Amino acid sequence: MNWVLELYLGICGALLLYYLIFFRKLLFFKPKQYAPEKLPPVSIVICAKNEAENLEKNLKVVLIQNYPKFEVIVVNDQSTDATAKVVEKYIERNPNLRLINIKKDIEKPMLGKKFPLKVGIEAAIYETIAVTDADCKPSNTLWLQHLIADFLHETKFVLGYAPFNKASGFINKLIRFDNVITAMQYLSYALMGMPYMGVGRNMAFKKSVFQAWDGFEKYKNVISGDDDLFVNANAKTSSTEIALNKDSFIYSQPKATYSEWMTQKSRHAKTSYHYKFHHRLLLFLFAFLNFAFYLTPLLFIFYPEQYIFGLIAIFGTVLVKFVFHARICGKLNNHDLIPYLMILDFIFVINLPFLFFKSLTSPNKEWK
């Protein structure tokens, strides 16, 4: 056995350990199939900037949630379209809906969505906060109760899943697969007692936790990360749950082109540089091992006598990855991706260096 084979077996072994240690719990996780009788009142906060069209389509589904007591707060972040008028129209028929307008002539003290989100949370009446976006639509009228059902006695965070809508074309499949891998990581790490992020499209938390924090002051010059930086700084092992009942999912439209998606991904990647060190290390190692898994076999060109053993290692690792990805795609309502999993995985991994360099070179832009 030469050094190339030893190196490759080490890479495959380390990658398999990631799946068997970190992702195993998610593989066998069973979501609640019911909602408890006593559900706390909830304040739903939605930040909107030039979202008249999306609010027209999606706000009605948020307002008709089958939930005992809740309010909806839409924070209009200096929109130049009819966002305010759309919300005002809904207010006429929904007394639990409130609109907060951020004046166009004020200079916001924080970049991105952080300031309007802070304004909405501080205005909330109730202790339990749920957040989503204007371009997101709950799967049905049971979304809120199944998200909040996972609040236990000591729970401070519930991390939900937000799939993208299905559409024709390979780019849509790649974007949804990337979303599955992201969810696989943050949901699995939460189950392992290491919550490091959540998605602001579908998440709930206690208002008192946000108030006890510095309210994004430390990250006010970071363009994104209103959701994951809050979770990264505050979520603890014993106070974080995940919601994986399919009724708790909330859907949104993905980017239509590779370029748009990469711009969005690079902005999110920049945020990850502010995670706690051990979270950054674990995420980097997983990405590195995946890249090395596909790249290192090229070295067998110089040692052809070892390629049989290399093929065995490749086949075994691919089999484990496929089983995990297929089961998790099923849990996350992306069954149609299963026939394409390995080609999607290969393209996803090969794309990682491009994403890394784009995150270093792309300029900061506002969230809308």
Image: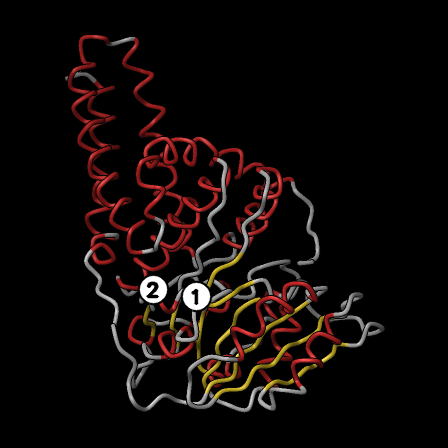
For image coordinates 20% across by 35% down, the residue present is: 319
Q: Which mark is residue 139?
A: 1
Residue type marked 1: Ser
Residue nearer the viewer, 288 or 319: 319
* Residue receiving disc 2: 246
For image coordinates 36% across by 36% down, the residue present is: 345
Position in image of residue 46 (x %, y %):
59, 73
Residue nearer the viewer, 272 or 56: 56
Q: Does residue 360 sit above or below 76 in this rendering? A: above
* The quadrant where residue 284 appears: top left
Contact check, label 2 and label 1, Cβ < 8 Å: yes
* The quadrant where residue 106 appears: bottom right
Dot 2, crowdedness within 10 Å: few (<14), some or many (≥20)?
A: many
Looking at the image, residue 199 sits to the left or right of residue 267; the answer is: left
Q: Is residue 232 visible?
A: yes
| Image quadrant in which the C terminus is located | bottom right
Q: Is residue 278 visible?
A: no
Residue nearer the viewer, 195 or 30: 30
Position in image of residue 362 (x %, y %):
65, 42
